[in-house]
Image: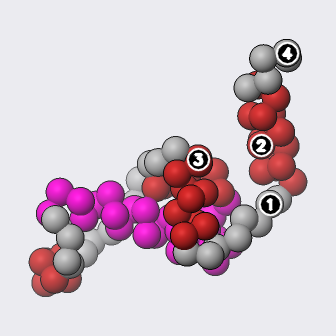
Amino acid sequence: MPITLQIPDSVASGMRLPEGEIERRLRTELAIALYGQGILSFGKANELASVGRFQFADLLDQRSIGRHYEADEVAEDTRYARSDDPKG
């Protein structure tokens, strides 16, 4: 079920961003904040931000937000790493 967030026009017009960039930037900022607070996993925050895994990791690094792994994320990263292995 998608969630729609209502941003008042006065707030949207007060953002110092180009109009075409507002939604993407808000999604990214929300994803970073929710991940940083432990509310979203890395994968789900990355999905919300709609950027590549490495780009999202770079964004976290720029904000000095460390990766926190849960067992399912370790397993997912391991599967991902092995799938890129040309031997196997």
- Name the spot of residue 19 as percent of width and height, x first: 14, 63
Residue 60 in the figure: left or right of residue 85: left
Q: Earlier in the sequence, mark 4 or mark 2?
A: 2
Q: Give the residue at mark 1.
A: 69
- Name the N-terminal-most of marks 1 and 2: 1
Q: Amino acid at mark 4?
A: Lys
Which residue type does callout 1 highlight? Answer: Tyr
Label 1: how many Cα within 10 Å (few below 14, some 14–19, many 20+): few
Q: How are the colours assigned in the image? A: secondary structure
Query: Residue 18, relative to residue 15: is it above or below?
Result: above
Q: Are marks 1 and 2 in contact (CB under 8 Å)?
A: yes
- Is residue 15 visible to us here? yes
Magenta segment: 19-41
Q: Nearer the viewer, mark 1 or mark 4?
A: 4
Kindly identify the residue that appears in the image at 20 percent across and 78 percent down: 15
Q: Mainly helix, strand or loop, the magenta region?
A: helix
Residue to which mark 3 is pinned = 53
Dot 4 crowding, Cα within 10 Å, few <14, some 14–19, many 20+: few
Q: Earlier in the sequence, mark 4 or mark 3?
A: 3
Task: Please state which of the two labelled residues, at mark 4 or mark 3, is closer to the viewer.
Answer: 4
User: Residue 18 appears at what percent x and percent y?
Assistant: 16, 65
State the separation of the CA atoms marked 1 and 4.
Answer: 26 Å
Residue 20 picture location, percent across and down: 17, 57
The answer to whether residue 38 is above or below residue 25 is: below
Question: Three-letter amino acid code at disc 3?
Answer: Arg
Residue behind mark 4: 87
**Is the Cβ of the residue at disc 3 closer than 8 Å to that at disc 1?**
no
Q: Name the quadrant of the C terminus.
A: top right
Q: CA distance from mark 4 to mark 3?
A: 23 Å
Label drawn at residue 77: 2
Is the residue 71 above or below the residue 18 in the image?
above
Q: Amino acid at mark 2?
A: Asp
